[in-house]
Image (cartoon, grey):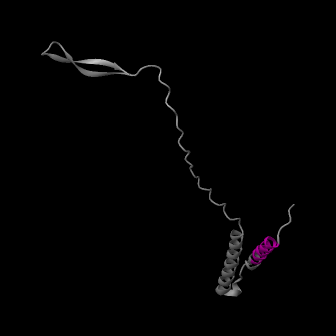
Amino acid sequence: MPALSLPVLARKGVCAALLGAALLSAAPASARDGRNGALIGGAAAGVIGGLAVGALLNGAAPPPPPPARRVYVEEEPVYVAPPPRRGPICHYERRKVWLDEVEFTYRRVEVCE
């Protein structure tokens, strides 16, 4: 069993003493004490009980710290070379085609580089 530190023992001792005092002061009031005796006894029991409960609640362990914020680290872009060409690149162009010396028309012609 681990040894308890002095502040923990002192806190537990104070709580036990307050609890015992609350139980002893909660004795029933008789009629010869009158109304004031019951009021004073009840108020004293409430104060002592409140102090005991407050000491117990304050002695509880503090809540854990909030989780750490996640930080997103963006990686640097990586250059990817285009794949090598496997053949000529072709496209279509509109070109003027002469039909005779005076007339012409436009036709689509495939041009490869």
Please identify the quarter of the rendering in which residue 34 is found. Answer: bottom right
Estimate the x, y position of residue 65 in percent, counting from the top left: 65, 61
55 sits left or right of 102 in the view: right
Q: Is residue 16 above or below residue 108?
A: below
**Residue toward you, 66 or 61:** 66
| Along the viewing direction, whichever of 12 and 69 lies nearer the viewer | 69
Give me the residue at 31% from left, 21% from top: 92
Identity of the residue furthest to the left in this view: 102
Quarter of the image with the C terminus is: top left
Q: Is residue 68 above or below residue 85?
A: below
Between residues 72 and 32, which one lies in front from this camera angle?
72
Quadrant assignment for the N terminus: bottom right
Q: Which residue lies most toward the top here? A: 100
Q: Position of residue 2 (x, y in %)?
A: 85, 62
- Residue 6: name its quadrant: bottom right
**Residue depicted at 83% across the width and 67% down the height:** 4
The residue nearer to you, when weighing 101 against 36, is 101
The boundaries of the magenta stretch are 6-21
Is residue 18 rendered magenta in the image? yes
Instruction: Identify the residue at image location x=72%, y=69%.
Output: 59
Q: Is residue 46 depicted above or below 75 in this figure?
A: below
Residue 35 at what x, y percent from top left? 64, 85
Main secondary structure of the magenta stretch? helix
* Residue 75, quarter of the rendered image: top right
